[in-house]
Image (cartoon, rainbow, N blue to C red):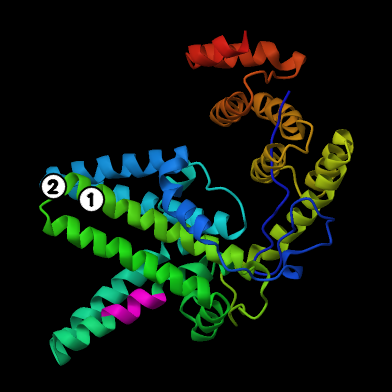
Amino acid sequence: MGYCAAAGTQQGALAVVTLGEAAATTQSRRQNRMIKPADWLRELAFPLINVGVALSMIITWLLLTLALAFGLFGLGILIVSITPLTRYLMAITQERAAGHDAPVFDAEHMGFVGNFWTMFPLVLVAIGTWSTILVQQKFGPGTAQATALVFSLVFPACVGVLAITRSTLQSINPIALYHFIRKTLANYIVMILLIGLLQWAYIELAGAGVSDGPLRLFGLYQLYVAYSVVGAITFASRLKDDVSIPLPAAPTEDESNIVEIKERENAATHAYGFATRGNREGALQHIRQFIDDHGRSDEIQDWFFNEMLKWDKAGNSNDAALFFAQDFLHQLLLEEKDLKAMKLLSRCLYENPQFRPASSDRPLVEELVSRHSRVDLAELLR
C-alpha cells in the first residue's frame, strides 16, 4: 500500500533539511541560484496546472462574483471569502519557500482565529492604502502615486519575510526586508517586472472592454502567481536557513513554539532516514516514541501524519504514513472522535484507495461510515 511524504521539513527561520541527503545536511550548503527563463514560465502556469490551486482560485472567483452581485448581503460573503483566500495564499508562499508543492485548500484555511500572521497581508494592504490616501490629501496625486509604487515594490518582501519567520514584526522590520531583497535581488527584479507585466495586461484588458467576470478571474490569477513566485524566489535563494533575517526581540506566540516544531522536525528527519533505508518499522517506532514522550495529542499525531505523507510522495517511505494512520485511526475510534476519524479515513483513501484500517478496527469503521451515511467510503472499503 502506498502511504506518502517529502523529506524536507520546515525549520522555522533557521534550517531546512535537503531531500535525499543526510539529516545533518542543510540547504545552506547550496549556492543561491538565478531562476531560469523556463522556470519563470512554469511559475506563470503554476496556478493553472496545479489542480488544487486552480480549484481554489475558481471557487474564490465564484464567491467574489456572488458577493458583488448581492449588495449588502454580499458583504458577508466577501468577508468570508477574503480571509481563507489570504490564509491560503500565505500557505502557498510558505510551502513553496520550503521547496514543497502548494498545499491542498482545506478547513484549516477557513478559520478566523489563530495564526494571525497568515492574515497580516490584509493589514499591510490596509496600511498601504490608508497611507496613499493620506499622502494624496496632503501632497497631491503625484506623491501618492510614488507612495503606492514604493509600497508595491516592498510588499513582496514583506510577504517573503512573513513566510520565513511567521512573525508580523519581522515582516515590517527594515533590516529583514533589506536582507531579503538584497539576497534575492536578481530574482526579485524579475519578479517585480513579471508582476508589472501582468498588471499592465490587466489594465489593457480592462481598457479593451473585457467583462467584469473574466477580468476578476485574471486579477485573482495575478494574486496567486505573485504569492507563489515570492515563495519560489525565497527557496531559490535558500533564505529559510538564513540567520541574517533576525527574530524580533519580543517573541510572538508563533515563535514561542519554534523550539517544539524544530524538535518534531528533527524527529521526523531522523525517522525519514530509517524509511529511506527500507526500515519502515524503525521509522514508525522512532515517531511513536517521540509522540509518547511529548503527549499523545491529536494535534501532534496529525502533524506527523502530514509530514510522513510528504515522504510517501517522494517515493521513499514504503507507505509509512498510512501505517502510522492505522494507529492514529484506532485511537480516534476508541475515543469516539467521529469527525476526526472520518477526516483521517477520507484522507487515507484519497492518498491510496487500497488503504484499509487494522483488521481489529474494521467493525468500528463500518459502523462509523454507516452512522454518518458515508456510502462513498463504504464502497471504497469493500
Q: Which residues are magenta?
A: 148-154
**Residue underneath mark 1:** 216
Residue positioned 61% across, 69% down in the render = 237
Label 2 sits on a secondary structure element that is loop
Confirm whether residue 254 shows in the render.
Answer: no
Q: Is residue 264 left or right of residue 281?
A: left
Left or right side of 149 for 319: right
In percent of width and height, residue 112 lies at 40, 52
Among the 4 quarters of the image, the one containing residue 99? bottom right
Q: In the picture shown, does residue 11 fall above or below 81? A: below
Disc 1 is placed on an element classified as helix
Main SS of residues in magenta: helix
**Residue position for label 2:** 211
Circle nearer the N terminus (1, 2): 2
Position of the N terminus, as image quadrant, is: top right
Work out how far the residue at label 1 is from the one at label 2, CA to CA, in angstroms.
9 Å
Q: Nearer the viewer, mark 1 or mark 2?
A: 2
